[in-house]
Image: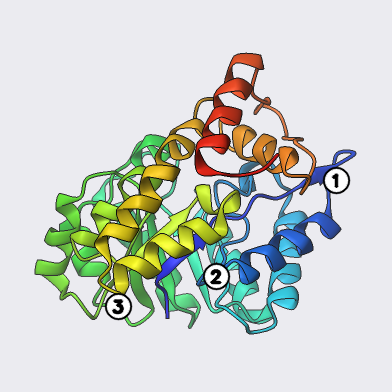
Amino acid sequence: MFHGSIPALVTPFKNGAVDRDAFVALVERQIAGGSSAVVPVGTTGETSTLTTEEHKDVVTLCVEVVAGRVPVIAGAGSNATDEAIDLVQHAKTVGADAALVVCPYYNNPNQAGLEAHFQAINDAVALPVLLYNVPGRTVVDLLPATVARLARLPNIVGIKDATGDMDRVSLHAALMGQEQFVQLSGDDPSALGHLAMGGRGCISVTANVAPDLCAGMHAAFHAGDLASAQEIERRLVALHKALFCAPSPGPTKYALSRLGLCQPDVRLPITGPDATARETIDAAMALAGLRT
């Protein structure tokens, strides 16, 4: 079910509120561009600055707009297990196909605590869950041995790995099997390498800006056309980097604003890219062939 290019959707704002019309248009653009699934209210969706009501509203809106055309993987992470369970339950109630659950941040739990956290979610809600390991943001690292134990649970179906450590693709496959456990990259610059190591796809930031190119890269790889996948990746690599030249998702929203798709607004403590960063983003968009 989960493969290919999967955008971690931005949450557009206008006058301080969620811009629902812009969000709907962005989702439609992703489906038209060939994205294989969508992820509302993940890290790129600024979930950390949304209220719980806003979070749930965006997930509900996404499910309604998608209307079954592609899977919806709802962001549902929290550093409080009970809150994560509530968000996963909401995702199930409104019809999301899965939940993306990040490792608890700030608390700095050990491996036993991480395992207990995901076990509790598995036991509470019958919805497919993708683990999300991003140590650069959470401080904690979900180690392969812990992932292997969690993969035995009926609702834990895969992982978004944003460590950039491609050795883990092989380690996970050796521990859990290549077909049974879905491995998705969470790191655009290494997504093609992740595929080559046996991954299924990427939950992507860059796909917000260039959905057709990202989808095309994955489609070419899975069709066995490595040369075309590499050619597309050469167009995208500067954009992958540029979208993190300032705190994310500021650069992504700026790029989307240059395309006329939403306002560049972000919520504090994130601020938008400065003039130097904007020049970097503009140059990367030009290299990718994106018209502004």
Q: Residues within 10 Å of mark 3 (few under 14, many from 20)?
A: few
Residue under the image location 49 percent in, 38 percent down? 239
Q: Amino acid at mark 1?
A: Ala
Earlier along the polypeptide chain: callout 3 or callout 2? 2
Q: Which of label 1 and label 3 is nearer to you?
A: 1
**Residue found at the far right of this picture:** 15
Please give the label number shown on residue 17: 1
Distance from disc 3 to disc 2, alpha carbons, whole Å, reads 31 Å
Viewer-nearest residue: 65 or 98: 65
Q: Position of residue 226 (x, y in %)?
A: 25, 62
Distance from disc 1 to disc 3, alpha carbons, whole Å, reads 38 Å
Disc 2 secondary structure class:
loop
In contact (CB < 8 Å): disc 1 and disc 3: no
Q: Quadrant of residue 23?
A: bottom right
Disc 1 secondary structure class:
strand
Establish if 29 lies above or below 208: below
Viewer-nearest residue: 268 or 281: 281
Please give the label number shown on residue 34: 2
In the rendered structure, the answer to whether residue 94 lies left or right of residue 37 reads right
Q: Position of residue 87 (x, y in %)?
A: 60, 65
Q: Amino acid at mark 2?
A: Gly
Is residue 90 visible to the viewer in this orientation of the structure? yes
Please give the label number shown on residue 153: 3
In contact (CB < 8 Å): disc 3 and disc 2: no
Residue under the image location 56 percent in, 62 percent down? 39
